[in-house]
Image: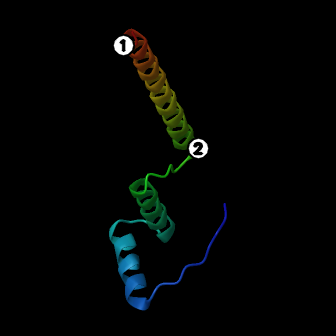
Amino acid sequence: MPGKRVQFDDETWHALDLLARDRMMDFQELADEAFSALLKKHGRPTDLKAALRESVKKEDSKRSISKKASVAGSRCSSLKKRQTP
């Protein structure tokens, strides 16, 4: 698992440390929760399973839209044929 260093000002660090102690969590658990919430807020998957589910939804949506468009296109062409004398 990759690791990164982050820097906080003293006030923020103390607030995070206090929150971690109050919730009986360590900093890593707080960070996991925070980044998971951030990804969810922006509609990004947090794991492979969620990414695959999202991909399938997008493909189904694209197929549905193209199917509706082709049905609508065929209706328009049949209407044009009827209107032509």
Q: Residue 40 placed where, x, y %?
A: 42, 54
- Residue 6's image quarter? bottom right
Q: Label 2 sits on what residue type? A: Leu
Above or below, 22 against 11 in this view is above
Q: Label 2 to label 1, Cα distance in Å?
A: 53 Å
Q: How is the image coloured?
A: rainbow
Between 55 and 75, the residue placed more toward the observer is 75
Is 17 rendered above or below residue 55?
Answer: below
Q: Amino acid at mark 1?
A: Gln
Figure disc tally = 2
SS state under label 1? helix
- From the viewer's perspective, is residue 67 above or below residue 10? above
Write down the residue under mark 2: 48
Q: For mark 2, does the 10 Å Cα neighbourhood hold few (<14), some (14 to 19), or many (20 or more) residues?
A: few
Q: Work out whether 72 lies above or below 14.
A: above
Residue designated by label 1: 83
Q: Are marks 2 and 1 in contact (CB under 8 Å)?
A: no
- Residue 71 place in picture, x, y as percent: 44, 19
Image x and y of residue 81, in percent = 43, 12
Q: Residue furthest right?
A: 2
Which residue is more in the foreground, 7 or 43?
43
Query: Residue pushed farthest left?
Result: 22
- The kind of secondary structure element at disc 2 is helix
Whichever of callouts 2 and 1 sits on the residue coming sooner in the sequence is 2
Tell me the quadrant of the picture where the N terminus can be found: bottom right
